[in-house]
Image (cartoon, rainbow, N blue to C red):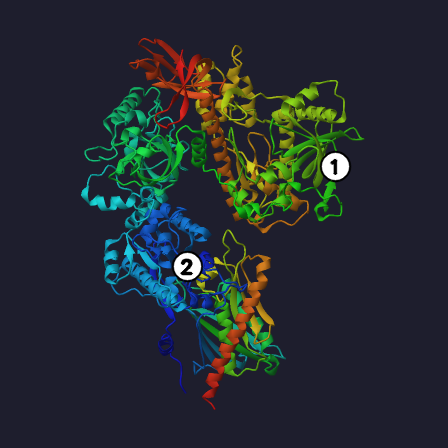
Amino acid sequence: MPLDTSTYSLALLRLDGRRWNELRRIHAQISTQAAADGSSYLEMGNTKVLCTVTGPAEGRQSGQRGGKDSEAKVEVEIGFAGFSGLERRKRKNDKRTAEMQHTLETAYSSLLLTHLYPHSTITLNIHILSQDGSLLAACLNAATLALIDAGIPMTDYLVACTAASSATSSDSDNSDPLLDLNNLEEQELPFLTVGTLGKTDRVSVLICETRVRMERVEGMLAVGIEGCKRMREILDGVVKEYGKKFS
Amino acid sequence: MEYFSLKRSNAADRGGLNLSSKVYVRSTKSGKVQKIVRELYLRQDIPCSSNLCRPCLETAPTDYTKKVAPFVLSDTPAGSKNFPNGQYLVPDTNAFLTGMDLFEMETAFHDVIVLQTVLEEVKNRSLPLYHRLIALTKNEGKRFYVFFNEFRQETHIPRDVGETINDRNDRAVRKAVEWYNQHITQAVKTRSKSQMRIPSVVMITDDRDNLRKAKMEKVPAITLADFVFSLENADELLDMMSAAQDQREVRSKKTEVFYGEHYTVSKMMTGVKAGTMHQGIFNVSPYNYLEGSVHVPAFDKSLLILGRENSNRAVSGDVVVVEVLPQDQWKAPSTKIIEEETLNKNDNPEVEDGETIVSERERKALQEEVKRAHGQSSEGKPLPTARVVGIVKRNWRQYVGHIDQGSVRSTSKTSRQQQMVFLVPMDKRIPKIRIRTRQAGELLGQRILATIDSWDRDSRYPMGHFVRSLGELESKGAETEALLLEWDVQYKPFPKTVLDCLPAEGHDWKVPASLDDPGWKGRKNLRDLLVCSIDPPGCVDIDDALHARKLQNGNFEVGVHIADVSHFVKPNNAMDKEASQRGTTVYLVDKRIDMLPMLLGTDLCSLKPYVERYAFSVLWEITSDADIVSSQFTKSVIRSREAFSYEQAQIRIDDASQQDDLTNGMRTLLMLSKKLKQKRYEAGALNLASPEVKVQTESETSDPVDVQTKKLLDTNSLVEEFMLLANISVAAKNYEAFPQTALLRRHAAPPKTNFEELANQLKVKKGLELRSDSSKALADSLDTCVVPEEPFFNTLVRIMATRCMMSAEYFCAGTQAYPEFRHYGLASEIYTHFTSPIRRYADLEAHRQLAAAIEYEALDPSLQSKSKLEGVCKNINVRHRNAQMAGRASIEYYVGQALKGKDITEEGFVMKVFSNGFVVFVPRFGIESLIRLRDLATPEPEAQFDAENYVLKVGGEVNGSVELFEKVNVRITDEVEQSTGKRKVKLTLV
């Protein structure tokens, strides 16, 4: 029986040896798929995501695909590789995936300057290669990179990460907020996913599916937003590094 | 353009030194195999936590509030013979598994480093030990520090190819010790050039291979035994070492096994799932230690487990898996008393060879049983028997007992020779425990606390070890502590953190004079009401007070005022947590173990007369027929006019010359309470009885003087009725406000089979009928169980009926369906405890819920969580029962003391008949005791037992018969019971 999240308070160390305010190792690349209009690959610890962007393109049949007269439509499809989780399982389009897709669609519809592309569709295809927590956050980050690679104008980076509230021991009620959860922590602790616009504190995505004490939320949000700022620096670095090749 | 490849990116990036990964394979419950990959971030800022080290302090981590945890390990650790410069101890897993009691000693074992590797292994091997270890790390005085060696760059080691997991863990421990030594040496050197005292970091292990490797690598290491030897109080400490490890070494010598092997967990689980095996809790009969029973969900009646072989090392209380035996081995439950003491007096704890698992005499006893069962098939009720095939969960705790004198080889007090002795537990259902000790001479005649460590197939009795001595047998202190320990009552003084939660004003606290004070917010001023309290004499923790007055419209206003404890005990502070753990106040004859500190219980909360106190009031408008018109709940301030004892109140009510308002109010209450009682009985409430006696003690020495049965006055039931009414009203209100989380109390209807035996006995012996289809039917038929010439007979039946009942329990509303809420005994649809918050935690929780229900204050989150409340309920249910048991045990002890040296003849009633003895109940002292055939005459007279008619015909010189419910005269003397060391009342037939 390995230790669980309750031992955090013993030495302020999480299950994988991180402190409360540390992100996992982030590795990202853009323009990974030549055939796509834009693409990216992102690792947050053992969560690995591949994202490709098609478009903006004209809808195949006007009216059916394709956006309204004035703006482009954003479509998101998320696929899970059979080997991505602990057990090999076929995931059809279940509700959880549908909700993630919907979250991404609404977030990017308002972020991208869609009015520049009337009557067209922007399709994001996200492939989950490996899951180890913070899945939605990884998808958002990978999508941002791929959209930048595709050259679709947007107001700022949309970056995301997760934050949890650590387990309380029986004798003390204070708990540290934890940043960027892995799978084990997500299963044991209440957590939320927060996405902000670049360096600002403007939250554009916020999802919390677990019950959490009201007074803890503030700390979790603060830590999550702080994490987003660091995430933006990392992604910005990736983009700039890639840009150097053209200089 | 350069494109991406998964392979390359990984290879290039994985080079980073600070990232490692842990890959392992595990199998799930359903049998699938999963491969798990986890990241490990290695770091250099994990402090060594020694106060000697400065660099670590600079890099120590901060939490969200920017606080740094203080360093744990002392800069001047204690030394020992081998390590004069002081030592930090690094025990390995086995050291904790075998020596946890040692590590918990206050006087030894400070400055211990618990490695993450070890902590994980301990958790793997034993969860209770893991929790004890975690508790140790939180104990500031012990200075235990958990070092996460697997996350520190220098001490992390990957597993080599072909290396077993144990070897790797041992290597990790050695590595950590090596690093620690270097680190501490360096830290001391940089701190001051002159200081030479460098403490050693010492590994404690009993693994020979590990010791050898440590020697090679020049890592300081020592065995646990050797280390303890080098300490000052070695003798005492050595006894506390678990016996399990010695056995490991000796085992190879012996091959003889006494017991069958336990099945593997997977085999048991498959069996239980398939229905061929059953899981349940193993209970041993208090009359016959060879007969156990297991209640399993698949059958109505319990399965019998007969004999040592079949019980296969299960100890009463364990969760076991059993297999039903073939039908030809089914037997009727024993009608014979078998006590371990009388059969196996001569067992030698040292010698195991040549012994059989069932001793010759035990076999004889069993044989007779079988004969009887076969011979009397006319009785025709053999029950299914079963045997234990495996143990799911041991429920071993610490046991109180005394050393069996016969098992001690040398009784000399000065002898330091190690010998094996038997500890005879006070609880008769627990087998003797073999204990190795060097202080046998000293321990004789003392109350001893010990634990069981293991029970192997090659040992007839479980092995255990000595924990501590409580004091002389029969001394008041030792016996009281023994029974508190035996019933797991927390009796240590309240820690400082709890006392810090008390109001700063102490005894000078007063209800604020100004009505604008925040304390008055939301409170009704009821100071003008003529309130009084009625309690047992000498009661200092007054929970409740009452008043009644006539209203304009001819109805009555009745108020029950309960001490407002929730005002003083706020949720989740240290005091609340302590109270929730204690669960209830425990009343012993000479002592009260409080749930809340004295200041609150007997002063600030207690509704003392003539002073103003905060209260939580329930006010009803009641018609003169005792119908409730309306009820109202409010926080209030009251001033009690008088504190009566039951007797005083009765005298005052009966005295017609007293015509003041207070007395008239009490008369009103009495009048209404009688009507309420009548209504309750009409609804089917049971009037049960339990033998209650009161021990009169001398006021100063609290030596018992006399024993009296409790008298019941009208005023007793006056208070009781209104408390019941308040509880029911509050339960309904709380349930309405919190349908999921209201804390309630239920009393399940007893299964019919419970009454079968009693009903049959009544029918056969007295021609009376006992119906148990509903509580009303039972109440009515109990009323008819009367024998005109013997008024006590009815009480006796009620006492016996009480024992057939289920016990009432606290539960959380969301866990049961509404019909299950019913309180069978009180015939009420819904019930809770509200009226005694000073002495019961359940009431305190009900207060908080009611306060939230009337929107006086917000509900604490802990009371909104069903799972947390369930935990609370579970605990207070256990505490409640234990408190009752401890109270009874205390009375039993004092009754024994009161009768010490006396010789009285009293009337008694036969309650139970066995084939070689019978149980007699003496109402005068509330005692019941066994009379065995061999007590009647020596040699033991022949006897014939007619099980159908419950008659035991005794032949020989006695020549008479004993039958159930018969009134007998018994002679009461006292003797010290050999098997438990308790002074007990002894009865003999006159």
Kind of residue indicated by mark 1: Arg
B488 vs A140, nearest the viewer: B488
Residue B366 located left or right of residue B846? left
- The numbered disc on residue B75 is 2
Q: Are the residues flagged by discs 1 and 2 from a single subunit? A: yes
In the image, residue A207 above or below residue B93: below
Q: Quadrant of the C terminus of chain B?
A: top left
Q: Which picture quadrant has residue B956? A: top left
Subunit that carries the residue with mark 1: B
**How busy is the neighbourhood of tag 2: few (under 14 within 10 Å), some, or many (20 plus)?**
some
Q: What's the residue at 19%, 35% (across, down)? A: B353
- What residue is shown with label 1? B527
Q: Position of residue B865 (x, y in %)?
A: 55, 49
Residue B693 x, y percent position in the rendering = 52, 22
**Most distant residue in the bottom direction:** A247
Q: Tell me the element at label 1.
A: loop
Q: Which circle, 1 or 2, is nearer the viewer?
A: 2
- Given the image, on which type of amino acid does mark 2 rest? Asp
Q: CA distance from mark 1 to mark 2?
A: 60 Å
